[in-house]
């Protein structure tokens, strides 16, 4: 029988994340950071997150708060609240930490955590990625990953609306 794991331990404050990231880096581990709304988790998200995790030893996710999602996506979003989105991400084997942030960008979170690798989807170029200056200045890598074609939260939302 597998030991029970409390996935909620992956959902941490900025200070807890900073302490863990610092400890991991002291042992030589590579920290990968990405961020997003992750409103309705779909195969595109899963593919992206597992690819991101493969780039280092620990995957840290900055999760937009509900207020932040509304400012970015509109008053009708998020569809799922922040605790639900965080818990779903924490359930993934590839994730190590989830930290919510309420700003429009994760710049301050990236500055606090100092990850070794910063990853975003392929619709960005490295110089457009928020926090790339921080990661590159310390000698880290900024990478983009291709999206899995045919998947998006907006497309799922449109499909659901056709059934209403």
Image: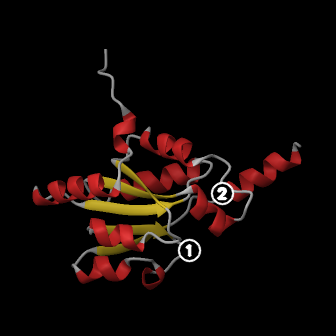
**Taking 31 as reference, is 4 above or below it?**
above
Distance from the alpha carbon under mark 1 to that under mark 2: 13 Å
Quadrant in the picture for residue 138: bottom left
Q: Which residue in the protein does label 2 denote?
A: 152
Q: Residue at left 69%, top 56%?
A: 77
Q: Quadrant of the C terminus?
A: top right
- All told, the count of numbered labels is 2
10 Å crowding of disc 1: few (<14), some (14-19), many (20+): few
Quadrant in the picture for residue 73: bottom right
Picture coordinates of residue 35, whole percent (x, y) = 46, 62
Q: Residue at left 34%, top 39%?
A: 9
10 Å crowding of disc 2: few (<14), some (14-19), many (20+): some
Q: Which residue in the protein does label 1 denote?
A: 123
Q: Helix or strand or loop: what does disc 2 sit on?
A: loop
Picture coordinates of residue 42, whole percent (x, y) = 60, 48
**Taking 97 as reference, is 119 above or below it?**
below
Q: Nearer the viewer, residue 50 or 2?
A: 2
Q: Are marks 1 and 2 in contact (CB under 8 Å)?
A: no
Q: Helix or strand or loop: what does disc 1 sit on?
A: loop
**Taking 76 as reference, is 146 above or below it?**
below
Q: Nearer the viewer, residue 109 or 31?
A: 109
Picture coordinates of residue 122, whole percent (x, y) = 52, 71
């Amino acid at each position: 029988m597998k030991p029970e794991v409390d996935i909620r331990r992956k959902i941490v404050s900025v200070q807890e994340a900073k302490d863990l990231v610092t400890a991991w880096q002291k042992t030589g581990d590579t920290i990968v950071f990405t961020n997003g709304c992750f409103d309705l988790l779909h195969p595109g998200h899963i593919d992206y997150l597992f690819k991101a995790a493969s780039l280092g030893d620990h995957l840290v996710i900055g999760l937009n708060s509900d207020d932040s999602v509304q400012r970015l996506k509109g008053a009708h979003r998020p569809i799922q609240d922040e605790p639900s989105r965080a818990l779903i991400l924490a359930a993934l084997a590839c994730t190590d930490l989830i930290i919510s942030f309420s700003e429009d960008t994760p710049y301050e979170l990236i500055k606090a955590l100092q990850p070794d690798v910063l990853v975003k989807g392929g619709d960005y170029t490295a110089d457009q990625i928020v926090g790339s200056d921080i990661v590159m200045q310390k000698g880290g890598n900024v990478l983009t990953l291709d999206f899995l074609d045919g998947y998006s939260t907006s497309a799922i939302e449109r499909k659901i609306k056709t059934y209403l």
